[in-house]
Amino acid sequence: MSNNGILLRILHICSVLIILIQSSVISQVILDPDAVVEEIVSGIQQPEGPVWREGLGLLFSDIKGNKIYKWTSEKGKEVYLDPSYNTNGLAYDLEGRLVAGQMGLRRVVRFEKDGSQTSLADSYDGKKLNSPNDLVIKSDGAIFFTDPDFNIPSGESKELNFNGIYRISPSGVLQLLTSSLTLPNGICFSPDESKLYVNDSQVHKIYVWDVVDDSTITNKKLLYTIPVPFGYADGMKIDVDGNIYCTCSSYVWVISPEGELIGKIALPSNVSASNCAWGDDDNRTLFITAGNSVYRVRPFVTSINKEDSSLPKSFGLSQNYPNPFNPTTKITYSIPVTSNVMITVYDVSGKEVVTIEDCQKKAGTYTLLFNAEKLASGVYYYNLTANEFSSTKKFVILK
């Protein structure tokens, strides 16, 4: 090797070491010093697609094992569905039914409450989908999913000449949103659902689009590029502040909405992380599928009822998170001056249901934990009034 080659090699190693050193320092911002990345399930062939539901626990797929498992702290791991037809991504719709990317049958499927299965999408333009991977469900009931081609069943061929991102409307119409990515994979919305994030695994990039009229995406932008030595971006989830948690190699990368690296959560034993999901009673535990195991950890998330140290410059009401939810969700609002604050919940007929905040607050940003245990499933609206300011958002209770 020439002297120039040796020098380039040294510079490359140094750059990787700098990234590692920065990550180990920054990660302390994300994790409590006493937090432990705990293995809760082992012995899974290929864990993926974790999703949490209050009262049920954690579900996750075992792609190679052809099963869906359920985990609770009381009973541990149990088989939930066998066979699963190589299911990957999982999510719940507005009626509490499980929706999945069923790669073995090349379709998006809904598991009905009577035990039957309904195929929601298996072809586009007369051709079979590739292998529906990860998915996310919007608060209006629309399903957004990715369809890369790296898990087409053995012996079958690819029929589409692209890898797409799709939307299934609440009425069941399949719509191609874009075919611009090489291998679209993880997918999630911003808390207010105005942005759609999708990573392109093969090129190590995370992209963001504006969501227009709830049904189309536009204004594609590169949000973040993961350095090549760390592998490819996989599953993604969002937190209440809009930060993206992206699994990649033996880390969960935490990236701000502005595209800046906040830090990384390191996993033990140099395993490769595939996906993650928020869960537990307060929705602040991050469950991570990686290697042959499932892990959990408690990252720092916006504190409940804690005033932000930086004063906001304007009034604002954020979209609640999670949404849909059962039975708790977080509502964040900002006031630039001391104000008389009232937050009221209304049903779809405009009838006042409950007031969850009615007091005077100093300038700041506040996050409330709202418990809807006594309310029925359905669509509701919550309104913030503070001095002369008024803003209304919609949420969905799912039981």
Image (cartoon, grey):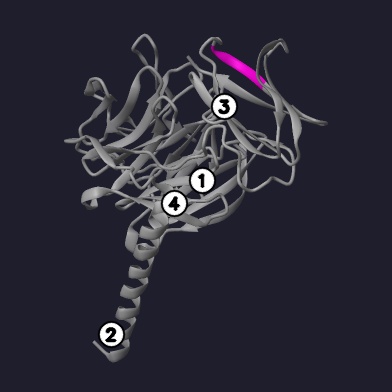
Q: Which residue is mark 4?
A: 29
Lower sequence index among marks 3 and 1: 3
Q: Position of residue 258 (x, y in %)?
A: 57, 53
Give the Cα separation between the discs numbered 4 and 2.
Answer: 36 Å
Q: Amino acid at mark 3?
A: Ser
The magenta segment: 377-381
Check residue 243 in the rendering and tell me which mark sits there, or answer none: 1
Q: Position of residue 21 (x, y in %)?
A: 35, 65
SS for tag 3?
Answer: loop
Give the Cα separation between the discs numbered 4 and 1.
Answer: 13 Å
**Quadrant location of residue 368?**
top right
In the picture provided, is 2 more to the left or to the right than 348? left
SS for tag 2?
Answer: helix
Q: Is 237 placed above or below 181 here?
A: above
Query: Residue at left 64%, top 35%?
Result: 318
Mark nearer the viewer, 2 or 1: 1
Q: Is 194 placed above or below 110 here?
A: below
Q: Residue furthest bottom?
A: 3
Q: Position of residue 235 (x, y in %)?
A: 39, 43
In the picture provided, is 34 more to the left or to the right than 328? left
Q: Which residue is mark 2?
A: 6
SS for tag 4?
Answer: helix
Give the Cα separation between the discs numbered 3 and 4.
Answer: 31 Å
Q: Is 115 placed above or below 40 here?
A: above
